[in-house]
Image (tube, rainbow, N blue to C red):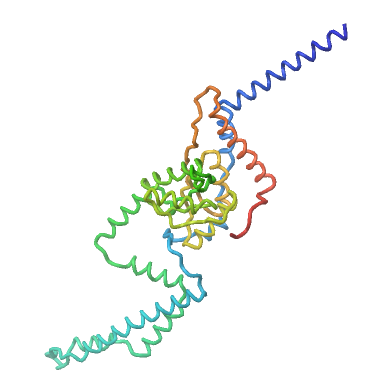
Amino acid sequence: MTAVSWPKRTIKRLAALALLVVAVVLFIMSPFYARAILWGLNKIPVTVNQVAAASQKGDGRIEEVDQPEPGSPEWQQQQQQIAEQQAQQLLKEFDQQEAAQKDPQPKDSANGTTSESTDKAQNVPSLAETLAKLQDDYLQDSSQVQKQSANAASNHTDSNQPAKQNIAKKLNKNQAHVIVVLGGGLGRDAMHNIVVNAYTRMRLEKAVRQKQHNPLPILLSGVEAPYMQNWLKAHQVDARLMENRSMNTCENTRFSALLLQKKGGAPRVELITDAYHMPRARRLFAMNGIDTIPVVAPLPNAPTRWKPSKSNLMHSRRATYEAIASIRDLWFGETNCREVP
C-alpha cells in the first residue's frame, strides 16, 4: 500500500505545482501583474530635498547658451569687454552733456542765467565719478551683471508689460522651467547606423507634443543625448541643453540637476519617461532638489485590457526591473552613481 500511495502523492504535488506555474505565467502575461507593481511603485513617497533645492532657486530663466565659468580667462575677457562697452557709453554721455552745457540757452528773466544749463551742470558727473563707476562695473561678477540686466529689464516701462506677463503665465501652464527627457537606449537602423531605439523615440515624440502644449526649453539626459538631438532636429525641434555623460537613472538625475543649476536653476521640471520608470526617476530628482511634473510617454506595445498576451510581457519585464531597482535603492542606496560627470 505504501509503495502504491507514494507515486500518487508525488503526481498530485507535481500537478499542483504545474497548475501554480501555469497560473503565475498567465498572471505575468496578463496586464494585471504590471498594473499591480505600478500601483505599488507609485505609493513610494517623493519628497524634495530642501537642502539640495536651495541650489535650484533661480529666477526661472534657463540659459540655453553656455556661459564661461566665473574666474576663467573667457569670463575675464567677457567682463573686460562689458567694462569697455560701459566706459564708451559713459564717456559718450559725458561728452553729450558737456556739449549741451556749452550751447546757449535763453536766460532766466529774474537772474539772467540759463536755467537749463544750470540744471545740466548739476547732472554732469565729474571725471572722478565716471572712473569710479567704471571701476565698480569692471569688478562686479557675472551674477551681479545678470542681476542688473534682469532689474533693468523689469524696471523698463512698457505699456504692454502686464499683457506680456499674462501671456507668459498662460504659456507656462504649470510653472515648470524646462522639459527633461530621459534616454531609453539606442539601436541600429537598416543601414547599421546608431539611432534611438523605440523606447527613446516614443519619449521624444511625447516631448515634441509637450513642447507644443507648453513651450519650454528641452534638456536631453543620457549618453543617448546626441542621437536624441539628431532625431529632434529632423523633426524641426532644437534642444540646446544636453547632458550626455550619465549611464543610469541616478546619474541622469544628478548630472541634470548640476547642469540646470549652472544654467540658472530649475526648481520644477516636466519629466518625460515611461510609466514604470517614472516613480524612481521622480524620487531621484527629488533627492537632488528638483520637483517633477510627470509626463508619461507610452511604450512601444500597448497592454491588453484583461486577457494574457505576449505584448504584456514587455510591461511585466519593465515593471519587475523597476520594482527590484527601487527596492535596492531604498535598502542599500544607489552604488553605481558617480558624483560628478
Q: Is residue 139 left or right of residue 17?
A: left
- x then y, percent, for residue 194: 51, 48
Identified at 27% across, 66% down, the residue is 157
- x then y, percent, for residue 14: 75, 17
Name of the residue lying farthest toward the bottom: 112
Please identify the quarter of the rendering in which residue 60 is found: bottom left
Q: Vertically, is 204 above or below 23? A: below
- x then y, percent, for residue 106: 12, 89
Looking at the rendered image, the quarter that the N terminus falls into is: top right
Which of the pair 187/338 is nearer the observer?
187
Identified at 62% across, 58% down, the residue is 339
* Total marks in image: 0
Looking at the rendered image, the quarter that the C terminus falls into is: bottom right
Identified at 43% across, 84% down, the residue is 135
Q: Vertically, is 294 above or below 29? A: below
Identified at 36% across, 86% down, the residue is 130
Q: Is residue 131 left or right of residue 124?
A: right
Which of the pair 145/322 is nearer the observer?
322
Q: Vertically, is 179 above or below 26? A: below
Q: Is residue 278 left or right of residue 94?
A: right
Name of the residue lying farthest toward the top: 1
- x then y, percent, for residue 174: 41, 48
Name of the residue lying farthest toward the front: 191
Q: Vertically, is 171 above or below 39? A: below
